[in-house]
Amino acid sequence: MDFVQTTFASFISLIPVTLAQSLILSFVVLGIMIPFRMLSFPDLTSEGAFPLGGCVCGVLLAGGASPVTAISCALLAGFVAGCCTAFIHLRFRIHTLLAGILMMTMLYSINLRIMGKSNLSVFGSPTVFDWVPFAQPGFPVSKIVAAGLLALVVFIVLNLFFKTEQGTAVRAVGANPDMAEAQGINVWAATIGGVGLAGAFSALSGAVMVQSQGFADVNMGLGILINGLAALMIGEAIVGKQTVWRQLTAPFVGAVVYYQLVSLCLAAGMPPPDLKLATGLFVLAMLALPSLRRSRGAGAPARETFRE
């Protein structure tokens, strides 16, 4: 009983911190979802675009730039990284996963070049969280409000965009590129633009995270892809993926739920090194579940026939 009470008390105390973190990292999950679901373009660029955005933001903040300027430049850098991944795939006929691996590998060196060292402190620099009224800067409340408002704006803009002609073209390319091309849609433009948009959101997450934690590190994206996939699987299990607004809602809902589950595991005493193993097993189970269901459904008639 004491263990349950202690775990519950620890979990409750961590909710504000993990809620702020999950809202910031939800943009990475969004950056994973867009190519994966809407473009049928499995991509690994997010693991390199996330620290890219953080490094660009950190260098600019250290140089005296405003938080908005730093985030804007991070968005642009992430967009370029995503566009490069899509171009490598389209131009050289390289598989999407391999193209993402190549870009992610190259971005590590680029991030080192940008910062000039492996990590950079930006403590004391202005952040977007300083602008939240009636909340002390740097505390979870200001981060929750700022990240929550940003998430709401991004959700509304993307929901409107994917209902426009250009957004529909992106979705059509993901559904059937040959048919889309036959309808006069520029497959290259839609693919490069969509993957670039995903890279921009991953970089946005990295930039906001640097402003939240006060430092940038070239290794800050390590493992972010598997965490993002786990969050996406949870979100899709909760809200579904049948419509555009459901697909856009899933990353935000999944990120919040996933990081609360991580917080609960830590509060229960799970060693932090075991979290990666637990996350990997969870993603494996979520990906394998539909196949297991189909296998069991296909096996049922055969057993009925045998009994007859």
Image (cartoon, rainbow, N blue to C red):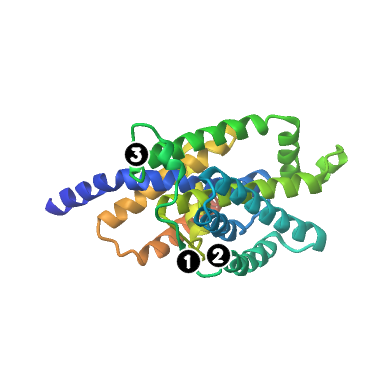
Mark sitting on residue 34 = none
Mark sitting on residue 141 = 3
On the question of residue 296 being in view, the answer is: no
Q: What element carries label 2?
A: helix
Question: Horizontally, is 267 left or right of 26 in the view?
Answer: left
In this view, 72 is above or below 3: above
Residue 255 drawn at (x, y percent): 45, 46
In this view, 5 is above or below 135: below
Residue positioned 26% across, 54% down in the render: 267
Residue positioned 61% across, 70% down in the render: 109
Residue positioned 24% across, 46% down in the render: 13
* Sequence-earlier tag: 1 or 3: 1
* Sequence-earlier tag: 2 or 3: 2
Q: Which of 146 and 292 is in front in this view?
A: 146
Q: What element carries label 3?
A: helix
Q: Number of labelled discs?
A: 3
Going by the numbered disc 1, the residue's amino acid type is Asn
Question: Horizontally, is 110 left or right of 84 in the view?
Answer: left
Residue 25 drawn at (x, y percent): 47, 49
Mark 1 highlights which residue?
119
Residue positioned 76% across, 57% down in the render: 87
In this view, 109 is above or below 56: below
On the question of residue 197 being in view, the answer is: yes
Question: Horizontally, is 105 left or right of 91 in the view?
Answer: left
Instruction: Tell me whether the residue at label 2 lies in contact with that at label 1, contact meaning CB atoms closer than 8 angstroms.
Output: yes
Mark 2 highlights which residue?
115
Going by the numbered disc 2, the residue's amino acid type is Met
Mark in front: 2 vs 3: 2
* CA separation in Å, label 1 and label 3: 27 Å
